[in-house]
Image (spheres, rainbow, N blue to C red):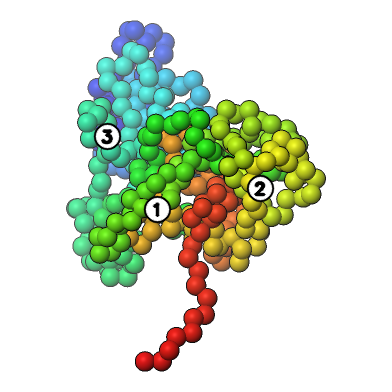
Amino acid sequence: MAFLFNCIRNPWTPVYGDDRPFSLIVAPTHKVLKDSAYRELRAVCPSALILREWKSPDWEILLANGHVIKFRTVRGSLEGASAVSILVDEIHMVPDEKIWLNYQARARDPRANNRMVIASGLPESGWLQTVFDGHEDDHNRLTVFMSSTENTYLPREVVEQFRRSAPGKAAEKYIDGKWMQSDDRVYYEFDPKKHLTDRVIDKSALTHVGLDVGDQSAAVFAHETRVTCRDEFGRQRIERGLHIVDEMRLLHMSTEAVCRRVRDRGWNITDQSCLLIDPTTRRDEIDGLRKVFPRVNLIRKSKKGTEARTEPGHSAVNAAFSDADGNTRVTLSRDLSRDSGTLYHSILNFKRGKYGTPVRNDRVDHFCDAFRYIVAHFMPVSRSGHQVMDRV
């Protein structure tokens, strides 16, 4: 209704000439457009308001005031469009923030009386929370959490039956409308609102590097910090922490060339620094590393591709993001890029497959590996073996 009302508020005027003002409804697939967005639009739109509808070559509706509503899927190209309004349905299925920002930029018709951008979908934590949460002071932005219990069109017995059969976390997401992590994420404790932070960064500070070398090399730069942690009884302790300050993605380069680029990035990498790499790194690659970093501490961590070796590293990362007492020991600089193919994007999109094992994906693996090497070294999970005790 809000979308339709904005279309009505922006009729054709002589300033458009042979052009027409238009608005966009975008959904992941044609089926979602047909069964959801289009169906609901027709339900609230009086038939007398629609002059004409086209299904081919493009799906469009012409309103009586000369405004055109266009239907597009996520895969459709919107580059260059200057719309009055845009509504993106099932926004949680849009893969990353960069695509969303492109959609948002489409509502830019300079001749419009009012421009509007609407997104609807499930509140999955990640880039969605980064964009839509915590903007209470912005008068041009509004986020509304809609609980299924407040949906007057949904029979009460349907909600109650789902609540009785769904796990608590699922109920929070699908019924209560609260920010929730995707169920299949490996690094499920990562929360952009909590872990993206602003810190004064000193390039002269001692810097450690996690490095995954190969055809698609990735480097992650970290500074050590000190973190005040509390246990369940409120007792304080000081622990080591890490702040990720930079990253590099380097394609189709030799190990030596990658190391030169890392060295020339400008961070303080000395003989007190740690360079953390995969234990499967070949001898010739190690020679390339040593040629550029002859005195840096070279540390090899968790073997790639072996679940028994990598799972402790994944546990270490999740515990560093948030331990059982809610303490955070690793953070990322808010200045890091959030585009596809970055560390931020990789952490959010590192998923488990059907049988619970991490899915290997070249677009996210390399940054996640380089990141894991650092965290697993400085903040390993506590692992206790057998212990012999006197019988009481």
Judging depth in this view, the residue of 61 and 308 nearest the camera is 308
The percent coordinates of residue 137 (x first, y second) are 22, 31
The mark found on residue 204 in the picture is none
Residue at numbered disc 2: 298
Judging depth in this view, the residue of 370 and 37 nearest the camera is 370
Residue drawn at the location 75% of the way across and 46% of the way down: 286
Tell me the SS state at disc 3. loop
Residue at numbered disc 1: 239
Assign the C terminus to one quadrant of the image.
Answer: bottom left
The CA distance from mark 3 to mark 2 is 44 Å
Q: Farthest residue in the bottom direction?
A: 392
Residue 52 appearing in the image: no
Residue drawn at the location 77% of the way across and 50% of the way down: 282
Image height of 303 relative to 99, above or below:
below
The CA distance from mark 3 to mark 1 is 32 Å
Residue type beneath disc 2: Leu
Assign the N terminus to one quadrant of the image.
Answer: top left
Q: Is residue 109 left or right of residue 312?
A: left
Image height of 174 relative to 265, above or below:
below
Q: In the rendered structure, which disc, 1 or 2, sits on the residue that comes first in sequence?
A: 1
Q: How crowded is mark 1: few (under 14 residues within 10 Å), some or many (20 or more)?
A: few
Q: In this view, does 307 lie to the left or right of 114?
A: right
